[in-house]
């Protein structure tokens, strides 16, 4: 098949969940003999959408990538203020159109190009419902389009403008059953063919190898990996860990890994690692005694599965239904609502070595059986062929 994949940004060094999913699917389908082209913006940052890549065509790991300039960068302060106004009174469709443009990445030539070449492709896959390229590109050839919405319960998805985004495409691919159930509640009239497929986990062999070292139980270390911003629950997590250290007397340390987009306290027990390479990420995941996922808004939770693959228990926010789904299916993690449950769950993980050993083995098996890239790619291929 000749397949076009449309995504807001793309690159080997871009670590966002939807972007990594697009790259894994594109590379997997190309490796299986399909002609795949990715259409994306020149942006690297999801906050500003500033042009960072050269416009034009290049090859990234065997996949043709066509980039288009962003014509309007995003001022997050002004955008957040506009969002508050819109969500308070969302009825004006013109305001919604303007908001999607401001949300970005506003690369109108990408959509223009798609109008001109859509007939050359048998399937078009749009990754993430939220952004401008999907909102406008999904109208071009809906009968051959598949949406991978990476949706969760957040304010924008209730805007009227997204009704068409979910009703037009011929197919919907979800990452979890929880995501599918939410979309059905939000868009009950959607009639697209659908499938729950999931996301492949990078470095699965390295993560899944039997751990050759474990964290020191006398000075255990928890790990957070992901976007370091208030909306991801990072501040609350730090407060919970600080209280836990005071209440329990356990000298728990905290590694924080990812791009810093908020002020962090200067506690001596916090190590801010920033971006790390793949080998270092694997090492930290394998050495942590627990991986904490505090975000209430996750459509899949890749780091949760990476931790499970690395034989490390997870502790997740109970509002993140997709992450909770993984914990329940794998029997490899606990979840909490508020500090008392956080403390109780953490004490159980740290204090019950038999439970921890059972969780780590079950988690690793769950990920190996369900979330290897070859398996995910075959599921995508089968769904695209069935449409």
Image (spheres, rainbow, N blue to C red):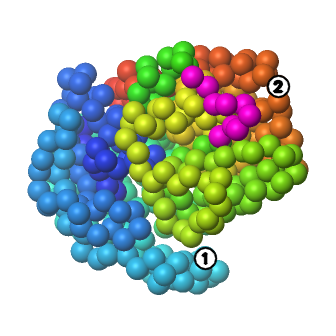
In the picture of the structure, the residue carrying the numbered disc 1 is 87
Quarter of the picture containing the N terminus is top left
Q: Quadrant of the C terminus?
A: top left
Q: Is residue 80 above or below residue 191?
A: below
Is residue 170 visible in the rendered structure shown here?
Answer: no
User: Residue 175 at x, y = what percent?
Assistant: 53, 37
Front residue (pair 137, 331): 331
Residue 376 lies in what quarter of the image? top left
Secondary structure under tag 2 reads loop
- Residue indicated by mark 2: 352
The x and y percentages for residue 240 are 77, 55
User: Residue 215 colored magenta?
Assistant: yes
Residue 22 in the image: x percent, y percent? Answer: 35, 42
Q: Nearer the viewer, residue 255 or 146?
A: 255
**Magenta stretch?**
213-221
> Which residue is rendered at x = 34% and y = 57% of the image?
8
Q: Give the number of the disc on residue 250.
A: none
Give the mark nearest the N terminus, 2 or 1: 1
Q: Is residue 89 found inside the magenta-colored segment of the image?
A: no
The residue lying at 38 percent from left, 21 percent from top is 374
Looking at the image, which is closer to me, 134 or 232?
232
C-alpha gap between disc 2 and disc 1 = 45 Å
Q: Which residue lies at the image location 41% right of the left edge and 45% below the top edge?
A: 276
Classify mark 1: helix, strand or loop.
helix
Residue 72 at least partly seen = yes
Labels 2 & 1 near each other (Cβ < 8 A): no
Q: Nearer the viewer, mark 2 or mark 1?
A: 2
Query: Residue 249 vs residue 361: left or right?
Result: right
């Amino acid at each position: 098949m000749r397949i076009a994949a449309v995504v807001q940004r793309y690159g080997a060094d871009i670590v966002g969940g939807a972007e990594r999913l697009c790259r894994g699917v594109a590379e997997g389908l190309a490796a299986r003999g399909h002609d795949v082209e990715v259409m994306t913006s020149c942006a690297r940052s999801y906050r500003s959408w500033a042009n960072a890549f050269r416009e034009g065509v290049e090859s990234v790991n065997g996949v043709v990538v066509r980039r288009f300039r962003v014509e309007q960068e995003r001022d997050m302060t002004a955008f957040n203020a506009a969002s508050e106004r819109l969500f308070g009174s969302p009825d004006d469709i013109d305001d919604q159109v303007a908001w999607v443009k401001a949300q970005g990445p506003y690369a109108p030539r990408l959509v223009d190009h798609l109008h001109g070449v859509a007939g050359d492709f048998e399937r078009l896959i749009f990754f993430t419902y939220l952004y401008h390229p999907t909102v406008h590109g999904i109208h071009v050839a809906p009968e051959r389009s598949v949406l991978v919405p990476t949706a969760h319960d957040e304010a924008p998805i209730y805007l009227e403008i997204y009704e068409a985004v979910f009703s037009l495409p011929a197919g919907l691919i979800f990452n979890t059953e929880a995501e599918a159930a939410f979309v059905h509640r939000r868009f009950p009239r959607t009639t697209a063919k659908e499938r729950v497929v999931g996301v492949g986990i990078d470095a699965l062999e390295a993560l899944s190898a039997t751990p050759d070292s474990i964290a020191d139980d006398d000075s255990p270390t928890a790990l957070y990996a992901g976007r370091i911003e208030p909306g991801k629950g990072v501040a609350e997590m730090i407060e919970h860990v600080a209280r836990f250290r005071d209440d329990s007397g356990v000298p728990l340390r905290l590694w924080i890994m990812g791009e810093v987009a908020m002020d962090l306290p200067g506690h001596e027990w916090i190590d801010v690692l920033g971006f790390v390479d793949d080998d270092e990420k694997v090492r930290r995941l394998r050495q942590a005694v627990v991986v904490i996922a505090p975000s209430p808004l996750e459509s899949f939770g890749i780091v949760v599965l990476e931790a499970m693959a690395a034989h490390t228990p997870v502790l997740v926010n109970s509002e993140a239904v997709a992450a909770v789904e993984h914990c329940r299916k794998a029997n490899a993690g606990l979840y909490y609502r508020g500090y008392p449950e956080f403390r109780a769950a953490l004490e159980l993980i740290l204090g019950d070595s038999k439970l921890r050993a059972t969780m780590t083995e079950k988690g690793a098996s769950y990920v190996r059986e369900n979330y290897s890239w070859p398996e995910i790619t075959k599921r995508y291929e089968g769904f695209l062929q069935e449409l």
